[in-house]
Image: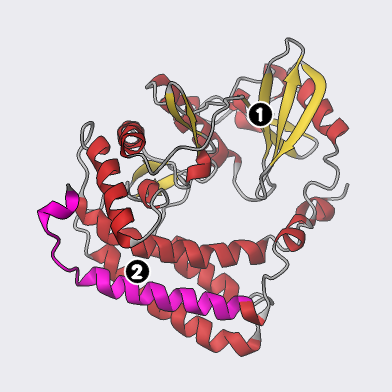
Amino acid sequence: MTATQHATQPYADLTPEHALDILERLGVPVDGRLLQLNSYENRVFQVGLNDGDFVVAKFYRPGRWSDAQILEEHAFALDLAKAEVPAVPPMALAADDFPPHLAHLDAHVLGSPATLGLVGGHRVAVTPRKGGRGPELEDPEVLRWIGRFLARMHQTGDRRRFAHRHVLDVRSHGRAARDSIAHSPWLTPESATRWLSLAEQALELCDDAFARVPHLRMRRIHGDCHPGNILWTPEGPHFVDLDDACMGPAVQDMWMLLSGDPRDRQVQLHALLDGYESVADFDWHELGLIEALRTLRIIHHSDWLARRWHDPAFPAAFPWFGEPNYWQGQCGLLMQQIEAMREAASPTPVDDEDWD
């Protein structure tokens, strides 16, 4: 497989047999059982072991993260596990097989290089399999429980900073994505003027929202804390998939857990914060960032689809992307977000009884 092929079709050679061979070379005692799990960004497999147990192997998309960024993800997961926050840390791989060029990196800051394997151009991490079901987010006690663990995650995240992973802000997550879309072939000419105009209006309002939070505290956070990344067991929740861990505001790990009409979301948010504040302080100014963060995610998602379109999995999964109707829908979403951010900038006073 040539370097060009690996860049444009990074998983073309990752057959089940090749994936198992790579894991064996990294010291994982596989027994031949392998099930591909749902993931567009990386390739993730549930793998059977000789002792009857299972692990999860993640093959990182080439070019997305640097080695240092991946090791910072691993270090965060290991920090959380050490603090008894229920996240799933990476396992140590065969010491002779970790990339030699990682040996100079500071293991105290970045975690152990032995948690990242490199075989045939594929970078791999392996974690124990942790089962569970989706959390029942309509249950206030479940939300309080999650809130307590988010507070502990953020306390751990505060203990040191990411040096290599990105910061979730308007520039990196919004304007960079907008500029990338503007220069891509997927923004149709008939949609470009309107979408770019609405995106700029929305990003200016995002800037305003961030500016209204005095002394905004950025810390290591999960970054992609939606319901699918929380698994529930009788012992409570645990967090999976720190692939998007970043420096960001605490509220980023909350707003994707809210759903329903405004009243429902308010009740859910109150339960989350009730649990969170039983463990750590929360800066309530950050609530004014929710619609801005939602807007950044909308713009970033379009850019993500455009940048991944060369991967055959994406046209198959998102056949509607890039069509005029898609951009018309995105313009509608941006108009909704512009209105929502304007309303958030002039909030209506809330009676105390609304939070009971």
- Residue 329 within the segment the image draws in magenta: yes
For image coordinates 52% across by 72% down, the residue present is 178
Which residue is more in the foreground, 28 or 112? 28
Majority secondary structure of magenta residues: helix
Mark 1 or 2, which is nearer the eye?
A: 1
Bounds of the magenta segment: 326-355
Q: Secondary structure at mark 2?
A: helix
Give percent across and percent down for residue 82: 41, 20
Residue, disc 2: 206
Give percent across and percent down for residue 167: 42, 52
For image coordinates 76% across by 57% down, the residue present is 311
**Residue 175 vertical position relative to residue 18 in the rendered view, above or below:** below
How busy is the neighbourhood of tag 1: few (under 14 within 10 Å), some, or many (20 plus)? many
Give percent across and percent down for residue 144: 30, 36
Query: Which residue lies most toward the top here?
Result: 51
**Residue 176 vertical position relative to residue 84 in the rendered view, above or below:** below
**Residue 17 vertical position relative to residue 307 in the rendered view, above or below:** above
Amino acid tagged 2: Cys
- Residue 314 within the segment the image draws in magenta: no
Q: Is residue 25 left or right of residue 102?
A: right
Image quadrant where residue 124 sits: top right
Which residue is more in the foreground, 230 or 20? 230
Q: Is residue 203 left or right of residue 313?
A: left
For image coordinates 55% across by 42% down, the residue present is 243
Q: Secondary structure at mark 1?
A: strand
**Residue 190 vertical position relative to residue 221 in the rendered view, above or below:** below
For image coordinates 23% across by 39% down, the residue present is 274
Amino acid tagged 1: Val
Do we see residue 177 in this rendering?
yes
Residue, disc 1: 56
Q: Is residue 7 left or right of residue 112?
A: right
1 or 2: tag closer to the N-terminus: 1
